[in-house]
Image: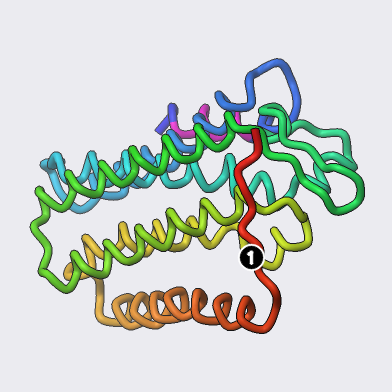
Amino acid sequence: MHLLIITSVVYNLWSKQGKVSRFSAELSLAISIGFLCYFGVSTQTTTLSLQSALLSLTLALLLLLLNSVPSGLKDIKTDESFKVESFVIASGCQMVGDDGIFIPKKVWWFAFSLQFIIVLSFVILGSLYRPSTLVIISIGVLLLLSTLHLRSILAISSFKALQRSSPILNGFYNYMALCAFVFLWMPTFIKLVYVVLTTIVLLLPLRLAYHMLRHRYFLIKPRQ
């Protein structure tokens, strides 16, 4: 518990300022949430399984990706105006003019490397939990959507377009996929909430597709 508090303090103090690297601050927050999940499991059982440990680790990776890249890009204009340095700004992302946004290739590599590790963690979790075919399909669809959405926000060169694309949606897809592993153990009310939220999240791509049909769409090449 002490480690959880310390890592949370590290993030709060040095996530956007100070001599501690921005990656270290983001990693501290992810570790904090991972341990929080693990301690939560420990209150319900005396024996902690490999599934619980891997589930907590995967949750930490999801938060690390969401908070460092999509959330950082969402706030990049505000952060620059207040002269603070988030992870993405420290990594070379910057506003170009009033609406342009530049995302260097190393941010692409960082984001997709994390997404790959997350997908790999899901594969291992699947082998441990052995969910039903329907759950496996749902998780696969959500992971595919999260990867495609991550690719789309990294390819956007307009800050306004980035805001319209709901940058943190990548995290929602990943979180919903992870929750599917423990769906059977959820209380009935939580199950209903999960189903409703997942349905809403899955309908969002249809809304975005409709928007693209009404407006001209250009494929944006990755930046060098």
Residue 176 position in % (x across, y down): 37, 64
Q: Residue at x 29, y 77 (%)?
A: 191
Q: Residue at x 56, y 33 (%)?
A: 26
Name the image quarter holding the C terminus.
Answer: top right
Residue 21 position in % (x across, y down): 63, 20
Q: Is residue 13 magenta?
A: no
Q: Nearer the viewer, residue 187 or 165?
A: 165
Q: Position of 57 compared to 104: left or right?
A: left
Q: Is residue 84 above or below residue 43?
A: above
Q: Residues within 10 Å of mark 1 (few under 14, many from 20)?
A: some
Chosen colour scheme? rainbow
Magenta segment boundaries in residue numbering: 4-11
Q: Amino acid at mark 1?
A: Ser
Q: Position of 24 compared to 163: left or right?
A: left
Q: Is residue 5 magenta?
A: yes
Q: Nearer the viewer, residue 180 or 142?
A: 142
Q: Nearer the viewer, residue 209 or 2?
A: 209
Circle 1 — which element? loop
Q: How many marks?
A: 1
Residue 20 position in % (x across, y down): 65, 18
Return the residue at label 1: 165
Q: Quadrant of residue 80?
A: top right
Residue 135 position in % (x across, y down): 19, 69
Q: Residue at x 23, y 39 (%)?
A: 53
Question: Is most of the magenta stretch helix, strand or loop?
Answer: helix
Q: Position of 48 compared to 30: left or right?
A: left
Q: Residue furthest top?
A: 19
Name the image quarter holding the N terminus.
Answer: top left
